[in-house]
Amino acid sequence: MKKPIQKTAHLTARQIFARNVRRYRRINDISQEQLALMAGMSRSYVSGVEREERNVSIDNMGRMADVLGVALKDLLDPALFEQVEKR
């Protein structure tokens, strides 16, 4: 019997990061503007990251992770929010 294909298997690191930032931010009820302000970025930059339009630097990834209170490695984990999706 074949294993089911995970829908996260085809995602790029940029897509995974964007999805996880958006979900973690929403779960914790933080607006894009709040995240941007606390991370020293513009709201349009955060929006571009979440829409996978920005090639975000590792430094900015770290700043966003710090503000969100999550380890950077977790924001790159494709399975991080699978349980949330199933609800």
Image: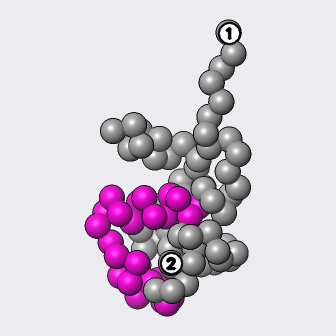
The quarter of the picture where residue 15 lies is bottom right
Main secondary structure of the magenta stretch: helix
x%, y% of residue 50? 53, 70
Q: Does 37 lie within the magenta span?
A: yes
Can you name the residue that lies furthest to the top here? 1
Identify the residue at the far left of this view. 29
Q: Is residue 56 visible?
A: no
Residue 75 falls left or right of residue 11:
left
| Element class at badge 2 | helix
3, above or below 22, in the image: above
Residue 39 as seen in the image, left or right of residue 45:
left
Three-letter amino acid code at disc 1?
Met
Q: Which mark is residue 47?
A: 2
Q: Residue at horizontal 46%, vertical 46%?
A: 81
Give the vertical position of 55 relative to 84 (above or below): below
Image quadrant of residue 16?
Answer: bottom right
Q: Which residues are magenta?
A: 17-42
Magenta span includes 41:
yes
The tag on residue 19 is none
Residue appearing at x 38%, y 44% in the figure: 84
Instruction: Identify the secondary structure beneath mark 1.
Output: loop
What residue is at 65 percent from the left and 20 percent from the top?
Answer: 3
Q: Is residue 53 above or below residue 8?
A: below
Indicate the quadrant where residue 1 lies. top right
Q: The C terminus lies in which quarter of the figure?
A: top left
**1 in relation to 8, above or below:** above
Please give the name of the residue rendered at 41% of the width and 60% of the height, measured from the top-left corner.
24
**Kind of residue sitting beneath label 2:** Ser
Point out the tag, 2 or 1, that comes first from the N-terminus: 1
**Residue, disc 1:** 1
Closest to the observer, 85 or 61: 85
